[in-house]
Amino acid sequence: MASFSAMLTPARCSRLLSKQLPSSRRLASTQSLRETLKEVIPRKQEQLKKLKLEHSQAVVGEVKVEHILGGMRGLKAMLWEASVLDPNEGIRFHGLSIPDCQKVLPSAPGGKEMTAESMLWLLMTGQVPTVEQSRELSRELAEKGDLPAFVEELLDSLPANLHPMTQLGIGVAALNRDSKFQAAYEKGMKKSEYWTYTLEDCIDLVAKLPALAARIYRNVYKPGTDLAPIDKNLDLVGNYSNLLGFGNNQTLTEYLRLYIALHGDHEGGNASAHTSHLVGSTLSDPYLSYSAALYALAGPLHGLANQEVLRWQLAMQEEIGTNVSHDDIKAYLWRTLKGGQVVPGYGHGVLRKPDPRFIALQEFCQSIPELKQSSIIQLVNKTFEVAPDVLKEHGKTKNPYPNVDATSGCVLYHYGLTEFKYYTVIFGVSRALGAVTQLVWARALGLPIERPKSYSMDALEGLIKN
Ligand SMILES: CC(=O)SCCNC(=O)CCNC(=O)[C@H](O)C(C)(C)COP(=O)(O)OP(=O)(O)OC[C@H]1O[C@@H](n2cnc3c(N)ncnc32)[C@H](O)[C@@H]1OP(=O)(O)O
Ligand SMILES: O=C([O-])CC(=O)C(=O)O
């Protein structure tokens, strides 16, 4: 089924961008996120109705045994509105590429990088927000950013040696005590109201993630230190950086803005997004749905790879020293592969070219002289110069190129956020943007409970014979 985003060709996309760009329009709109969604949703509901009515039986692919045995790779089986991933071009958010988003999405005052709020707005509505709209959303998120006292106490009671991702999932799940969706469901709300309560929970959840994630960082790595209060005049990531204790570092804060906007969504089939969608399809509230997603993100083949990359690159540095040659890296890569391990940060389930998120983060590093000189960033770069050829020669992976995790941690490390077991938590703050968007859309479109058909091997052999 072709989605709205998939139908946006690059030419249509630039027309759309030029329509959205005039400054008069960007400054004029004061419509809130809720009002914008109220306008957009009926059009999408109509589109879905038409698709069901006119094309329900259209064939868009076939199911092969390799799909059933191969983790459903390549199977066209999910509706996901906010983004579509092309194997060669990478991700487009409602048709906009990463460079498009960098051009048009509003930044924070004094900054250049797109904010998490403006990406959330784009994902939710398919529209580029005005500066005022994104600032208004920042204000709302900051006002809702404090944690309930019982969640603070719960987090403070967890052992410091419990992985930060486990703690994040616990904290997010606990927030469901105050779920507006769950409370309204118990009172017997109508199906047409599901999305409005879901949206309220989703905004509350995104708003509270910085305080939740920063409290975990403080408890595990900086016990006894104070957490800054939430500043009502700062954007979501500005506050997050402040709470982590890095608010004075403008470059790191800008990097975090870019990082969190870029990691926000990667179409629907990735393990974290899909988990959130699956759990949400049972009408579990957004907190429980996203908590489940975080535990998919916490696997080393998915989001945890960013922690693994740093561990692996530092081990390389320790073994070989800082003055590393291409041949040294090649030999180290072969040792990793011959040891039966994957090279973290390389390969992808869909992408077949270097991940444009990797490119965007690398470009950020190249634009800052201090980062350009950083030994860890240079090591990541040098590894990129060698690894694709080694992986091609190894001959197993379908994609020998880096994914976003290959580089995302090195700037954090350079600036002193060296606790790499924490890195996936930052990814977890980001991935909520796409996951909550889909939860709102799934409820607005009345998507059903997910329930694919499974087969045993005997049953499959029976199917093949017949
Ligand atoms: C944000 C993200 O989640 S991006 C992904 C982050 N994960 C990583 O970076 C971990 C390293 N990469 C990988 O393990 C894989 O490339 C994945 C999980 C990302 C994708 O997996 P798949 O779609 O199954 O990849 P693919 O079809 O290319 O795998 C074929 C074979 O190549 C191997 N392979 C894939 N990537 C790598 C790699 N980086 N290093 C070594 N071997 C690899 C697979 O393990 C598989 O081997 P097998 O046949 O013995 O099982
Ligand atoms: O798309 C995937 O399977 C993994 C990924 O890069 C992401 O979720 O960001």
Image (spheres, rainbow, N blue to C red):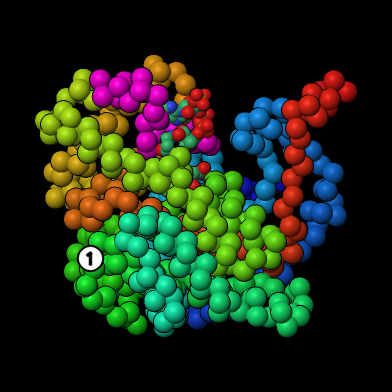
Q: Is residue 336 highlighted in magenta?
A: yes
Tell me which corner region of the image, top left, top right, bottom left or bottom right, holds residue 460: top right
Q: Residue at x 35, y 71 (%)?
A: 156
Instruction: Check disc 1: other Cα within 10 Å, few if <14, some if 14-19, many if 20+.
Output: some
Is 150 displayed left or right of 214 in the figure?
Answer: right
Q: Position of residue 201 (x, y in %)?
A: 56, 74
- Disc 1 residue type? Lys
Q: Position of residue 395 (x, y in %)?
A: 44, 18
- Compared to residue 343, the image places residue 263 above or below, namely below
Q: Residue at x 49, y 56 (%)?
A: 294
Q: Position of residue 410 (x, y in %)?
A: 25, 46
**Secondary structure mainly formed by the magenta segment:** loop
Q: For the magenta stretch, what is the residue range?
A: 331-353
Q: Residue at x 85, y 44 (%)?
A: 57
Q: Which residue is mark 1?
A: 222
Tell me which corner region of the image, top left, top right, bottom left or bottom right, holds residue 167: bottom left
- Compared to residue 303, the image places residue 36 above or below, namely below
Q: Is mark 1 within 8 Å of ligand 1?
A: no
- Compared to residue 156, the image places residue 89 above or below, namely above
Q: Secondary structure at mark 1?
A: loop
- The quadrant of the rendering that contains the C terminus is top right
Residue nearest the viewer, comparing 291 with 381: 291
